[in-house]
Image (spheres, rainbow, N blue to C red):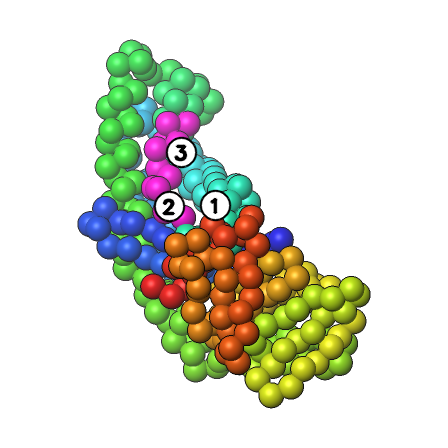
Amino acid sequence: MYRSLYNRNWRLFLANGDELAFTTCELYSFLTSRRFLSALALVFVILVATDPPLFQESLPILERAAFWLLTIIFYVVLLLAGLAGVKLYNLRRDDKAIVLPFISVPVLCITAMLAVGFGVSAFGAHAPEASVTRAPIILATSLVASQCFEFVIAKWIFVEHLREGRSTSEDTHIEPLLVTSGGSIPLSSILYLEAREHYVDIVQVDRLVTVRSTLSALTNQLPADAGFRVHRSFWVAKSSLQSAQNSAAFKDVRVSGGRSIPVARSRQKDFRDWYQENFR
């Protein structure tokens, strides 16, 4: 399950209408990269230096720095938890991409309310007056600033990270292998897998290999976009698909070699989504 989650696709729509497409793996590599940490450090310095009006009285610089450091850590933790929650909820939707909203609003609401109600007192100062009337102003100014930060990071820093990562992966591309009890089989040579009792037939371009295994044990090794399990007994490789027959319902698929494989009724909608996502 976690391997499947790690390779899922995402789509992020920016405020200017641009669209970013990436995998969970690419997002995780960015969140743990030096480039992202440098961006957060710059945001941290800006927040501490400008002292946005979260408090009635400006906090001393060390207390202000501690507050913003905890806020940024909370922001990143909430981001990771939110992504994991959304993807786990949608795990059975195969490779269907999900649109990500900006996450500033829930973070800022929680942070601002804590700051207005308890933040100043926690640092030894006096609580701000008229906190209810000041809260909308705090949220509005913080929301504008956070959207600017998020847009800059997503539009330029994250895009550059994706470009470098994909360029490196293309230069060092290694073809995926299906590891079986009889050895490793290149994914590009596989047409489809057919499950039999206690065995699985691996149908290749030029031969048939039968191994003692389960279909799930084999398909769990493969990337989500490498193929689709159209039936509890069949998995078809993306590279071997020639057409989806009865396209309105996606009831059958034809693979290289001419064989027609039925699509289970319960999987037709998910297969249609996967097919349209990978062959558009």
Residue 83 image label = 1
Dot 3 or dot 2, earlier in sequence: 2
Can you identify the residue that label 2 sits on?
100
Kindly state the secondary structure of the residue where label 3 is placed.
Answer: helix
Q: Is residue 67 left or right of residue 259?
A: left
Query: Which kind of residue does numbered mark 1 sit on?
Result: Leu
The residue under the point 53% across, 69% down is 260
Find the residue positioned furthest to the left.
16
Can residue 201 be seen? yes
Quarter of image, res 39 = bottom left
Q: Nearer the viewer, residue 178 or 235?
A: 235
Query: Which kind of residue does numbered mark 3 sit on?
Result: Val
Q: Which residues are magenta?
A: 98-110
Can you identify the residue that label 3 sits on?
107
Query: How many residues crowd around disc 2 within 10 Å: few (fewer than 14), some, or many (20 or more)?
Result: few
Q: Would residue 103 be counted in the magenta stretch?
A: yes
Quadrant holding the C terminus: bottom left
The residue under the point 62% across, 64% down is 234
* Circle count: 3
Q: Are marks 2 and 1 in contact (CB under 8 Å)?
A: yes
Dot 2 or dot 1, earlier in sequence: 1
On screen, residue 191 above or below 119: below
Q: Is residue 80 left or right of residue 52?
A: right
Query: How many residues crowd around disc 1 within 10 Å: few (fewer than 14), some, or many (20 or more)?
Result: some
